[in-house]
Image: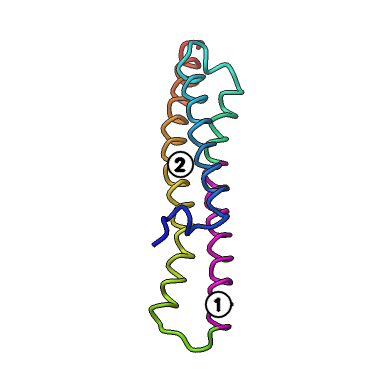
Amino acid sequence: MNSLWIQLGLIRWPLMFSLMAVVLVTGLSVQRLFRPGAWGDLRTKVWLDAILFWGAFALVAGVLGTVVGVVLAAQSIEAAGEVSTTLVWGGIKLALLSSVLGLLILAVSSLVWFGLQFRWRMLVAAEAAEGS
């Protein structure tokens, strides 16, 4: 049996790219957010929002992979004529894996984004309280 990496087909590349982008942007955001004066640099906020963007991109890529996978499975079933239900559901299960992975990447990036966004807002609030 082929590995999951091979079974995902071409959609594995956008999913992997978005996962790497989330990890990279998270690292850059953490670096920027935990330095002195981070609250005053609006580019830090842009990096934070990029985490959520790449997570959402992974979900969109995953759904696209599912749609393409279901269409390909339907074409194969149509060409074969009568097939077993086990084969049909096996194809559908494989098609759904890309959506599951995209959703998982979005979930992780959303949690990371929320935590770092909380830190950002606490820094801004502390600065506002200190300034008044």
* In magenta stretch: residue 104: no
Q: Amino acid type of disc 1?
A: Ser
Q: Nearer the viewer, residue 81 or 11?
A: 81
Please tell me which residue lies in front, 6 or 13.
Answer: 6
Mark 2 secondary-structure assignment:
helix
Q: Nearer the viewer, residue 34 or 58?
A: 58
Crowding at mark 2 (Cα within 10 Å: few <14, some 14-19, many 20+): some
Q: Which mark is residue 110?
A: 2
**Mark 1 crowd level (few <14, some 14–19, many ≥20, 10 Å Cα):** some
* Viewer-closest of 69 and 30: 69
Q: Residue 16: image x %, image y %?
A: 52, 44
9 lies above or below 21: below
Residue sitting at x 58%, y 72%: 71
Asked whether residue 68 is drawn in magenta, I would say yes
The residue labelled by disc 1 is 76
Q: Is residue 85 above or below residue 100?
A: below
Q: Quadrant of the N terminus?
A: bottom left
Q: Where is 118 relative to 17, above or below? A: above
- Does label 2 or label 1 sit earlier along the sequence? 1
State how far apart marks 2 and 1 are (Cα): 37 Å
Q: Which residues are magenta?
A: 53-79
Say which element carries label 1: helix
Magenta span dominant secondary structure: helix
The spot of residue 49 in percent (x, y) is 56, 35
Q: Residue at x 48, y 19 (%)?
A: 31
